[in-house]
Amino acid sequence: MMTLNAMDQVLYEAQRQGRISFYMTSFGEEGIVGSAAAMDPNDPMFGQYRESGALLFRGFNLDQVMNQCFSNDLDKGKGRQMPVHYGSKQHRFHTISSPLATQLPQAAGAAYALKRSSITTTPNSNGKEDGQCVICYFGEGAASEGDFHSALNMAATLECPIIFFCRNNGYAISTPSVEQYKGDGVASRGIGYGIDTIRVDGNDVWAVYAATLKAREIVVTQNKPILIESMSYRVGHHSTSDDSSAYRPKKEVEDWNLHDNPLTRMRKWLTNQGWWNDEVQEITKKQIRADVLKAFGDAEARKKPSIPSMFEDVYDCLPQSLVEQKNEIMELVRKYPDYYRVHDFAKEQQ
Amino acid sequence: MLSINSITRTVLKRHVLSVSLPRLLPTALAGPLGQSRHYSSMYDFEAEPVRGANIGIKHTNLLNRSASGIRTNPELQQQGVSDNETKKMNYCQAINDALRIALGTDDSAVVFGEDVAFGGVFRCTVGLAEEFGRERVFNTPLTEQGIAGFGIGMAAEGHTAIAEIQFADYIFPAFDQIVNEASKYRYRSGGMYDCGGLTIRAPCSAVGHGALYHSQTPEAYFAHTPGIKVVMPRSPAQAKGLLLASIRDPNPTIFFEPKILYRSTLEQVPVDDYTLPLSKAEVLQAGKDITIVGYGSQIYVLESAIKMIERDMPGVSCELIDLRTILPWDVETVADSVNRTGRLVISHEAPKTQGFAAEVAAAITERCFLRLESPVERVCGVDSPFPLAHERFFVPDVVRCYEAIKRTLKY
């Protein structure tokens, strides 16, 4: 949680300095870590975009974060997406897509696939995947999209092993949740679809952990979906392109940050247990910030992915049209290397 | 949705959070954050072949720096507004002005979409909720299919529905409502019903750092849909007149706004209520040797490429045409031009294969085959999703356009 917070501070500032193009912080929503802790490391994860905490918990490291945010040649996503659009097959984390809620029906389908592979007689190349569960994150705003409704209904009727995890942080950019829905939050909709649902205090990491752990147990033993609505508050702006002072009072943000912050609550709990004190806090904070800055510096110094790599992965192999376009562009690049600033890019790997 | 800061070269305003210019950076932090390096200085305009050419929006001749361009504009003269008061507006302010006029002149008009009430993520609707009330300018829940369908229903009951889709990249949940419903409402009812009062505004196109989902220009999908109109203006004065025309046109209209222009274009705009004709292209620069066709923000890239051509090939003159409306489009103006010049280059930011340039090329080949002296050339986006780090190679930049025009001229 502290790493997430430190990383957010540095990358937010870096965007403000024009060194990365975009960023989204998790300030106030660090409690999400509790949900990741309750899952099996092999459970597939689908995120929306504010789930860096869950990915970090899985072991996605600071270098990987920074390489993605700088879209450099070590970014596994090959520098194609905006910052925070992480993905890592190694961590079973499906790559983020900016369009909202599209991940929800996909996650239901992935869960159905898990269920099927656990009953197939011949195990696939990954081996049998018994008792796995998908977790799919989304915001309360995304829950207004049609995809949310299809996803819940399909997961319920097809009995998919999945946890739908709603991060209700009160705002969809400027739109407060009171303008997003009239019913009793997102939780009430789960009931309507025949899905067992729990609402949890998202700023209490242990509550999030306990609810997700129990949800997972139900999912894998009974093969049915569960909906968790985790109530929190978006302390940061929506993204670096947003200035939330245009639509919410500063005092509201300060009050939440002061009185109900997941990091502060966790720190108090640890202190009460006698496992934490101010000195440990300071040392840890300092070390984490140093680690973050080290990864930051390393990633920033690297070049962008090689130019020809931009033509890869549209299909499994290049169709004729792309071969021609690649040739045309590479010829221009050779003709005008300075204009295209080709030194920004890594050399093509042989 | 991710609201990205829209424009690299822009004015920094309080709520317009476009802060990617290095000279606007706050004091650097200590440690490795101390060395500042800009992430996307895409091209070196001091390098060959651009060096010395005054290119880009900063040097454009296509914006009305003074009111004289307004005074002499025949389309505005026809409307009787060319001699009246003008005001300097950027593209965003011109959209805002058109919406204010639409709301002020039509009691049935409403403006709605995600985050619209506080002014919208690009600030195009700023002040409208305060002026006309939250019943007429309102936030919707986050559902594009809902927004489009809701607008169709209002329009089918005779009201004027002006919907905003936050980014053109996010219009696709509404695709069914637009393609199967809005476009066919009139036809399927034998003309009894229509939803002509619907206009859907959507910011589109590249900004330098939008990547896959904040950069797309999806006009071609909609250009394949009989029953709707598709418009993409290039400048503030154009945007105001074409938006009012779209809102008042008795057909549903998709109105794409190249978001890089919101703050990078500034020109004199008539203060009056006026419209500009839909389905009418505009010849921006007359020429005799080649016809260059584009629309939206690509117009400025083409203007720059033409400057370089005319610099490097003395005596050559290029005709530049802005289509303005993509569907139904003005084939006559383009055909007339190509019949004179014998050569045609079309350019758009969207991927080449099945892009709108293909339609222009086919239609012109049908009409002008015997007059053509070179193959019709398309300069377009790459046939791939829109990449972040490689944007400079994806888009049909000024040098790629320059080379294509040169190739066509020398054929």
Image (tube, rainbow, N blue to C red):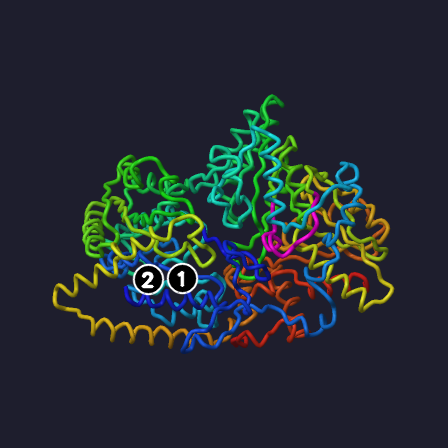
Q: Residues within 10 Å of mark 2 (few under 14, many from 20)?
A: many
Determine the secondary structure under disc 2.
Answer: helix
The first of marks 1 and 2 along the sequence is 2
Vertical relation: B403 (above or below) B193: below
Res A121 label: none
Pointer 1 with pointer 2, Cβ within 8 A = yes
Res A55 label: 2
Is B79 in front, or is A211?
B79
B261 in magenta? yes
Q: Residue at x 39, y 39 (%)?
A: A179
Vertical relation: A347 (above or below) B332: below
Q: Residue B24's x, y, as percent?
A: 53, 67
Which chain is home to disc 1? A
Q: Which residues are magenta?
A: B256-270
Is A327 in front, or is B185?
B185
Which residue type carries mark 1?
Answer: Tyr
Q: Residue B286's x, y, as percent?
A: 83, 53
Residue underneath mark 1: A86
B389 in magenta? no
